Image (spheres, rainbow, N blue to C red):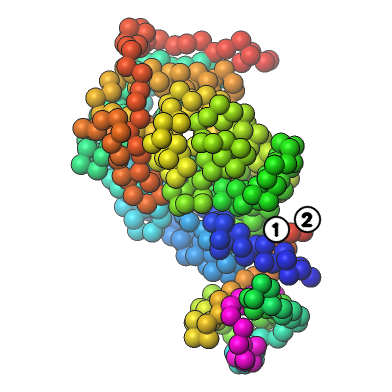
């Protein structure tokens, strides 16, 4: 299954390192990644493959959300279908 | 690959503009629960709802988490109880069984304590209607609706007269909560059988055994989209609403098909209604004001609402494989922060609301009037409202709260999604003689299409 992970928040050293470490721990493969600073906000979007991950998407979402709180960014994990259905016919 | 701006657009819609799926409603047929013994019927009804909808809340929550889209309500609608209970006559036992099942499945509301009497009453229907005030005062989650008119049959004025008295009695029996019972009671013309929204949802007899219907929402998203086209002509406004409605509905369609697959229940329809909530920024009135009205209710309001309602349908209809339910903008006063403000400052009157119901769904909705309003006056307002539906071949409805002990200018607070209603003035001139005539108003000329 493909999931889109979005990270928004204040920029600082090590955000990507923290998040990718957690993804690696959960056997989640990153297929595509884009990161930019939009209006002073750190914005990172990752397309990931979660088929090897042992956790459900809900559990993963909870874990990522908890980590987001710890490092001061907001993280969402969503099934990629929601974006496809909204923006593609 | 979806690009960054599209992903961020979706996330902004959800986080900042209150985009959500308003309800997943499971329709369940109870026709196979009918028994001449009231207790046996009630037990069968409880068991069937638990069996069918036991996983509804959990499935809804799972989808919510996986897709990151809030699903506000999970609900159940059932076959009109006037039919299910007619063999036993023990309607109240069924009301309690529905309430228990709703509580035990964890859903927000259960709809279907309903009767269809648009042409006349069976003996059972009459007895059923008399139980509505008690059913609504003795249960917490049961919603009731009565269809008293249709374009095909005309208006059952005896039912209109009776519903005026039932609304008054319901208010009286629930006076400790401001007449809350009336917030769970809708009277319809041209009621639809697949409506996922409460309080008017019931599972029609033409529906399958069990079905999933989804209601989308998103007034806040439409308002924000319109903020970006300030000063543009009304064609651009309509186009912007259409595009936004398309995106909102696609999400509803996704949730509907996913819920249907996971629950093993066929997908019925997506209802395109724009449903407001009392949260600031989630208001239909604010959309109308964004189009260019100083306040909702000002001259031009009906035209703006007509544009909005039409554009929502045109955008939504291509986004879903099956569209149904009510599919129009809702204008419930107590549930819409902008409507409440408009009433408070005197911009929006009951008469203007009535005009607005000609061009949107559903009707005069969640309006509080003084507690001393007579049953005849309520019946008169109801007759007017259903006449609009019958003549215009559309659904209209009345959900009115004659708030016990309250006067014009007071506020009735229902809490949660039902919000708070400022008590509005209602025309005090009598219509008692007309209501007392009773009988049936014949179906209009254009019902004769065959």
Above or below A73: residue B110: above
Q: Residue at x 52, y 40 (%)?
A: B285
- Within 10 Å of disc 1 (Cα), the crowding (few <14, some 14-19, many 20+) is many
Task: Tell me the element at label 1.
Answer: helix
Displayed quadrant of residue B399:
top left
- Chain designation of label 1: A
**In the image, which residues are magenta?**
A1-18
- Within 10 Å of disc 2 (Cα), the crowding (few <14, some 14-19, many 20+) is few
In the drawing, does residue B307 fall left or right of residue B338? right
Where does the image place residue B447, in percent across and percent down from the top left? 61, 15
Q: Which mark is residue A86?
A: 1
Where does the image place residue B77, in percent across and percent down from the top left? 46, 45
Q: CA distance from mark 2 to mark 1?
A: 8 Å
Q: Is residue B215 magenta?
A: no
* Pointers 2 and 1 within a single chain: yes
Above or below A67: residue B275: above
Q: Residue at x 73, y 37 (%)?
A: B233
- Which residue is at the front of the view, A45 or A3? A45
Displayed quadrant of residue B6:
bottom right
Q: Residue at x 73, y 41 (%)?
A: B232
Task: Tell me the element at label 2.
Answer: loop
The N terminus of chain B appears in which quarter of the rendering?
A: bottom right
Q: Residue at x 41, y 40 (%)?
A: B340
Where does the image place residue B124, in percent across and percent down from the top left? 34, 26
Q: To which residue does mark 2 refer?
A: A89
- Chain designation of label 2: A
């Amino acid at each position: 299954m493909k999931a889109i992970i979005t990270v928004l928040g204040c920029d600082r050293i090590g955000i990507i390192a923290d998040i990718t470490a957690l993804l690696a721990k959960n056997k989640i493969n990153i297929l595509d990644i884009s990161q930019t600073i939009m209006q002073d906000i750190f914005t990172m979007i990752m397309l990931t493959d979660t088929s090897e991950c042992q956790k459900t998407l809900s559990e993963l979402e909870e874990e990522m959300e908890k980590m987001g709180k710890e490092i001061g960014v907001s993280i969402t994990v969503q099934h990629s279908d929601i974006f496809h259905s909204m923006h593609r016919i | 690959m979806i690009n960054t701006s599209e992903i961020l657009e979706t996330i902004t819609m959800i986080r900042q503009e209150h985009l959500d799926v308003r309800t997943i409603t499971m329709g369940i047929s109870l026709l196979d629960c009918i028994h001449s013994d009231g207790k046996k019927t009630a037990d069968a009804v409880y068991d069937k709802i638990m069996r069918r909808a036991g996983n509804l809340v959990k499935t809804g929550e799972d989808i919510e988490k996986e897709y990151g889209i809030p699903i506000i309500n999970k609900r159940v609608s059932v076959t009109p109880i006037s039919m299910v209970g007619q063999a036993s006559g023990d309607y109240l036992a069924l009301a309690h069984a529905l309430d228990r099942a709703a509580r035990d499945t964890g859903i927000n509301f259960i709809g279907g304590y309903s009767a269809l009497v648009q042409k006349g009453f069976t003996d059972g229907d009459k007895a059923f209607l008399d139980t509505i005030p008690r059913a609504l005062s003795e249960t917490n989650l049961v919603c009731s609706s009565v269809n008293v008119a249709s374009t095909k049959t005309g208006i059952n004025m005896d039912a209109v007269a009776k519903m005026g008295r039932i609304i008054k009695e319901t208010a009286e029996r629930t006076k400790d909560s401001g007449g809350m019972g009336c917030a769970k009671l809708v009277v319809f013309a041209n009621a639809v059988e697949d409506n996922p929204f409460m309080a008017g949802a019931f599972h029609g007899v033409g529906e399958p055994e069990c079905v999933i219907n989804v209601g989308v929402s998103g007034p806040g998203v439409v308002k924000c989209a319109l903020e970006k086209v300030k000063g543009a002509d009304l064609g651009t406004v309509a186009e912007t609403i259409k595009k936004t409605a398309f995106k909102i509905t696609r999400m509803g369609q996704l949730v509907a098909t996913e819920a249907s697959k996971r629950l093993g229940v066929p997908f019925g329809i997506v209802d395109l209604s724009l449903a407001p909530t009392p949260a600031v920024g989630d208001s239909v009135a604010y959309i109308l004001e964004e189009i260019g009205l100083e306040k909702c209710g000002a001259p031009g309001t009906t035209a703006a609402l007509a544009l909005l309602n039409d554009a929502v349908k045109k955008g939504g209809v291509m986004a879903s494989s099956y569209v149904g339910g009510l599919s129009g903008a809702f204008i419930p006063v107590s549930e819409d922060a902008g409507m409440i403000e408009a009433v408070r400052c005197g911009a929006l009157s009951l008469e203007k609301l009535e005009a607005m119901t000609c061009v949107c769904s559903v009707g005069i909705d969640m309006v509080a009037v003084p507690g001393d309003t007579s049953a005849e006056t309520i019946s008169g307002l109801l007759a007017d409202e259903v006449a609009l539906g019958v003549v215009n071949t559309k659904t209209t409805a009345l959900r009115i709260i004659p708030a016990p002990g309250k006067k014009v200018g007071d506020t009735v607070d229902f809490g949660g999604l039902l919000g708070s209603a400022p008590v509005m003035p209602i025309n005090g001139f009598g219509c008692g003689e007309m209501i007392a005539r009773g009988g049936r108003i014949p179906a209009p000329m254009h019902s004769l299409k065959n």
